[in-house]
Amino acid sequence: MSESDRAIVTKPYVAQYPDPIEFEAGALLKVEREDTEYPGWLWCRAPSGREGWVHSSFIDRVEQNATGTTAYSAKELSVTAGDDGYIIHWLDGWAFIRLESGVQGWIPQSHVRRCAP
């Protein structure tokens, strides 16, 4: 990480999914639907039965079937304004961040901003 990856949460967010999809590279997934609000995100079902949003960059997809290309978790974070950390992924409306406390997960990009180096 570099200093340019620093981020600060600008408004609170409460995680929406208590038991999100997680999978390892090579997992076979079923693609249920595409997100109309956030293009590039797909509602998928993992072999475990867990469901959730997965960005298309984490899977290889052929119609309704997909294979995970890397380990992935759709864990969202509940955050408050002023929380800070590092941006790991910045993808189509969502940011995957690691807070200073060490916890990491997704929050909407509209709730976080990059800090100047």
Image (spheres, grey):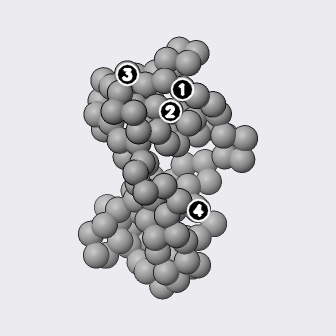
The amino acid type found where label 1 is placed reads Val
Q: Which residue is mark 3?
A: 28
Mark 4: amino acid: Gln
Alpha carbon of mark 1 to alpha carbon of mark 3: how far?
10 Å
Question: Residue 65 at x, y = what percent?
Answer: 49, 17
Q: Is residue 42 above or below residue 78?
A: above
- For disc 1, the neighbor class at 10 Å (few under 14, some 14 to 19, many from 20) is many
Kind of residue sitting beneath label 2: Cys
Furthest residue toward front: 49
Q: Which of the two marks, 4 or 3, is nearer to us in this view?
A: 3
Residue 86 position in % (x across, y down): 38, 67
Per the model, the C-alpha gap separating discs 2 and 1 is 4 Å
In three-dimensional space, the C-alpha distance between marks 4 and 3, rounded to whole angstroms, equals: 28 Å
The kind of secondary structure element at disc 1 is: strand
User: Rounded to the nearest whole Å, what is the CA distance between mark 2 and mark 3?
Assistant: 10 Å
Which label was assigned to residue 44? 2
Disc 1 and disc 3 in contact, CB within 8 angstroms: no
The residue that label 1 is drawn on is 31
Residue 111 x, y percent position in the rendering: 59, 70
Tag 2 and tag 1, C-beta contact below 8 Å: yes
